[in-house]
Amino acid sequence: MAWLYALLASRPVVWLLLFVNAAGTIYGYYWYRYQLADTPPVFLPFVPDSPTASLFFLVVLVAWLFGRSAPLFEALALVTLVKYGIWAVVMNVLVWRVTGTLDWAGWMLIVSHGAMAIEGMLYARFYRFRFLHLMLAAVWTLHNDVIDYVFGMMPRYSVLADYVNEIGYFTFWLSIASIAAAYQLGVRLRRQPLLPGGMSFRQASE
């Protein structure tokens, strides 16, 4: 696996991911445009779940390119990329099962959000966040579930309206699983010595 981590840490790959995730983040906020227009201002930071997850990862990528790490954003990125990546895949598969069809946008969401979850886990070995950072990310993530399913700010899938209680229950446990995965991948496992972007963490600290 050393070759894979060397590839992931290379500067061209980090730049590529920066551009891809920036495009996805912009499109994600555009996708939420109608819901955001109807959202009370106090809830606005908590509505566009997936683009905000990729925005967290963008901060991480930019920090790496400058030879730095951003531990809190690393924790937020890992938890939310995994959670919302899996969530969107499951929701679109459920739309397919309920309606018997799925348009090209739904398939695009399955592919792009599956990639979100994968990139979050692939880069976990490079993260430098600690348990405190993970706990702050956990508070953000679980608080977001409250905003979504207590205050009704969840992403709009009209064909799944009859299953909102079950979706809320699933989402809560998906949050717990994502936090647990982030602890295992980002805190317990041995970290990679390279800083993505072509510099070692020792060099970055000098």
Image (tube, rainbow, N blue to C red):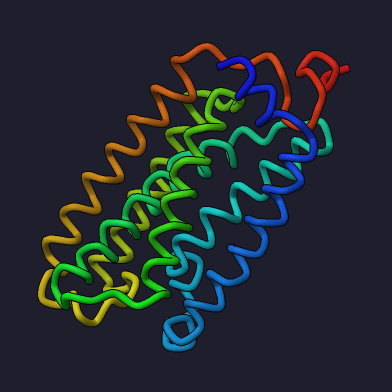
Q: Along the line of sight, which residue is nearer the eye, 160 or 16?
A: 16
Q: Is residue 96 above or below residue 16?
A: below
Identify the residue shown where x is 42% and y is 82%.
35
Name the residue nearer the viewer: 194 or 53: 194
Q: Where 96 sits versus 87, above or below?
A: below
- The C terminus is located in which quarter? top right
Estimate the x, y position of residue 33 in percent, counting from the top left: 51, 83
Q: Compare residues 43 and 20 and report the one nearer the observer.
A: 20
Is residue 69 depicted above or below 44 in this figure?
above
Q: Quick one: quadrant of the N terminus?
A: top right
Residue 89 is drawn in which quadrant?
bottom left
Residue drawn at (44%, 66%) of the image:
108
Q: Is residue 40 left or right of residue 73?
A: left
Q: Residue at x 34, y 60 (%)?
A: 88
Q: Is residue 67 above or below residue 3?
A: below
Residue 90 image point, x, y percent: 26, 57
- In the rendered image, which quarter is residue 109 located in? bottom left
